[in-house]
Amino acid sequence: MRKKILIAKLGLDGHDRGARIVARAFRDAGYDVVYTGIRQSPEMVVNTALQEDVSVIGISILSGAHLVLIKKLLELMEEKNLKIPVVVGGIIPPQDIPKLKEMGVAEVFGSGTPTSKIVAFVNKILGDKYDT
Amino acid sequence: MIPEGFFEGDKRTLAKLLTMIEDGSIDYEQFYSEISPRMGKAHIIGITGAPGVGKSSLIGALIKEARKEGKKVGAILIDPTSPFTGGSLLGDRIRIQELATDDAVFIRSFASRNSKGGLFKEVRMAVDAMDAFGFDYIFVESVGVGQAECEIYEVAHTTLVLISPFGGDYVQIMKSGIMEIGDIFVITKSDLGNCELMKSFVEKEISSKEGWKKVICTSLQPPKGIEDVYLAIKEHRDVASKNYGIKVKWSIISAMRSILEDMLDNIDEEKINSAVREVMEGRMSVYSAAKKILREEGIEYAR
């Protein structure tokens, strides 16, 4: 299985400590982690994922704009025929989690989630469905 | 083997091809037979220097210069692989992410894997794939290096060595290794001061060497010297094509070395262990044990 993950901060909030903690966890789990940094548009994320040929996208978002931005991201991915799982983390109100999953997000991890749980989940979905 | 759409400029197919190259799941001969008619157009620019000296940021600024002229640009950015976990943090893009939505720019990060020369093993193939794809410029950024990693010189037509204005005194500049491979020396972060002194050290050093060389001070905030670097790169192109033969020669030697290293990694452990016993029990010398194993692997070389 190809262990290459994109970690991106989608939208305009500038708080990237969470994204960096998750990036470190994947790095230490043997992944190649492409880190885009903050203030990424959906277009930037999709283009980066295509050029880097990552096997999964991890989005960190704390601004409250998750429903709008994730929808746009998933639409663009659909448009460009990019079929890889998207995992979301950050400050997501519980009532929005089912909505994000309905849109096609593989899983949502709120603050306080142990990084080992996130890594285990991604290992599992890559192993299960996206083994190359 | 070359994905459909590659020669029509579909960037997704380039990304997939680069993955195949990275994984080593590609047939060399078939690869080159399909792409070589399209190769040889791009100007390959290598960027090297210490961690944090400003390699990625300079690449970003140079890509913008090239875009002003409507050139198509590819970039290969390399960061180190952990020797402990095998993982990597590929963080070079963060400096140039604003270019992610430019259709004429393609940026790809690679981990260095077990390569020791500051690049990754199949970097030449990756560069050749990008060349055949039709970029005018291809930037190759090495991992942050120390003093000895010179591999980039073999791959690039033009090599930029970046030096921080506080990168040491004139003795550091006199040392062998990466100070010898630069065509253009760029003193970065000149806004921090000390740039002219560092420039004078480098100028003194290169004045004792033959050939085309330049030293330029730059800063990005505020922007200074970037156009000069871009012009110098263009000027160097003609010089570079004359010297490229020797680089290819070195590359072939490097490739042979890496193939042999691969072969050594794959020798049956039991064969080596039994040689250890022979040596420990005094029946063989280390050197003759090594030769015996190589002979069994089909390598006949006695000196």
Image (spheres, grey):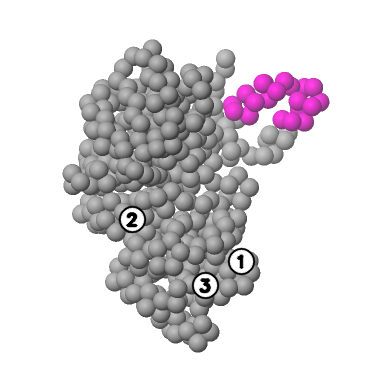
Q: Quadrant of the C terminus of chain B?
A: top right
Q: Earlier in the sequence, mark 1 or mark 3?
A: 3
Identify the image quadrant of residue A112.
bottom right
Residue B71 x, y percent position in the rendering: 21, 45
Residue A106 falls left or right of residue B5: right
Describe residue B42's horizontal placement relative to residue B119 as left or right: left
Classify 10 Å Cα crowding around label 3: few (below 14), some (14-19), many (20 and above): many
Instruction: Determine which residue is flagged by label 3.
Output: A90
Q: For mark 1, what is the residue?
A: A115
Instruction: State yes or no: residue B273 in magenta.
Output: no
On screen, residue B76 versus residue A106, left or right, reads left
Q: Amino acid at mark 3?
A: Gly
Residue found at x 58% / y 73%:
A111
What kind of residue is marked 1? Thr
Name the subunit of mark 1. A
Q: Quarter-wise, where is residue B48 in the image?
A: top left
Disc 3/disc 2 C-alpha distance (Å): 23 Å
Q: Secondary structure at mark 1?
A: helix
Q: Amino acid at mark 2?
A: Glu
Same chain, labels 1 and 3:
yes
The stretch of residues the image draws in magenta is: B275-295
Disc 2/disc 1 C-alpha distance (Å): 29 Å
Return the mark for residue B98: 2
